[in-house]
Image: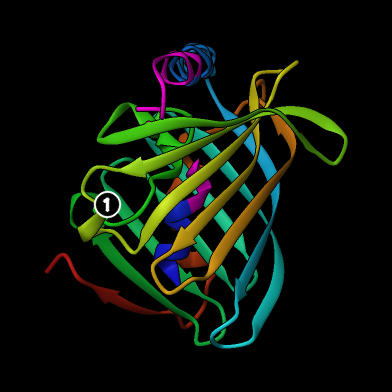
Amino acid sequence: MKHIFLFVLAFIIAGTTTLKAQTSKDILDKLSAKAKTFKTITADFTYTLNNPKTSTNQSLNGNVKVKGSKYYVSMSSYQIWCDGKTVWNYNKDNNEVTIDNLADVKDGGFDPSEMFTIWEKNFKHEMKNAAATVDGVGCYQIALYPNDAKSKAYHTVMLNIDKSKMEVIKVEIKTRDNATMTYKVKNFKTTTEIGDGEFIFNKGKFPGVEEVDNRI
């Protein structure tokens, strides 16, 4: 379950023709340039999992905070803190936190701190629809394909980018077992002050928590 969060929250790249490839590159370059001006990111999102094989169709609400390489994610019974070096995954249901080095868990999923620049590393891209809409909002729809697809649990990431704001508002991740994970972003803000302490797990706030430290 924890790796699902890392898919997001990211979000989250060689087209079928030269024109399409150039168009998708232009849009992603603009998106990256804007994202790199953000000091912090805060957003609410809705996560939906649809898996026909298991007849699963569920939706959950969550929120994310990002500051440089640091991030915090909360969704349902799960919370994740990362201070840029260490990752704490907390499960409320069993009052347990798993502690890992970021370098040990980063592969195989998306890092929320790279949600607007992930395509700069090891992805092909393709403009799928330059006139898409999401809830009435005009969007560019760009597909990302990982170069090292065999090592990933997913094969395609579909970005929907608000044309007027140049912001990602919807991400669809298509997995190898034909499931689709969808993230719809709401209340996107880039001016919120966030203290570094918000990206570190505070054991004192979780009485009786069991720690599983994989760094040892």
| Residue 101 coordinates in the image, percent (x, y) | 21, 55
Q: How crowded is mark 1: few (under 14 residues within 10 Å), some or many (20 or more)?
A: some
Q: Is residue 55 above or below residue 116?
A: below
Quadrant in the picture for the N terminus: bottom left
Q: Please state which of residues 53 and 11 is positioned toward the viewer in this rendering.
A: 53
> Mark 1 highlights which residue?
106
Instruction: Tell me if residue 11 is in the magenta stretch.
Output: yes
Looking at this view, name the residue that lies furthest to the left: 216
Q: Please state which of residues 70 and 165 is positioned toward the viewer in this rendering.
A: 165
Instruction: Tell me if residue 16 is in the magenta stretch.
Output: yes
Looking at this view, name the residue that lies furthest to the right: 136
| Residue 175 coordinates in the image, percent (x, y) | 43, 64
Q: Is residue 75 above or below residue 12?
A: below
The residue at the point 71 percent across, 46 percent down is 44
| Residue 124 coordinates in the image, percent (x, y) | 33, 34
Q: In this view, does 41 lie to the left or right of 136?
A: left
Q: Is residue 184 left or right of residue 54?
A: right
What span is colored magenta in the figure?
Answer: 8-23
For label 1, the SS is: loop
The residue at the point 57 percent across, 51 percent down is 172
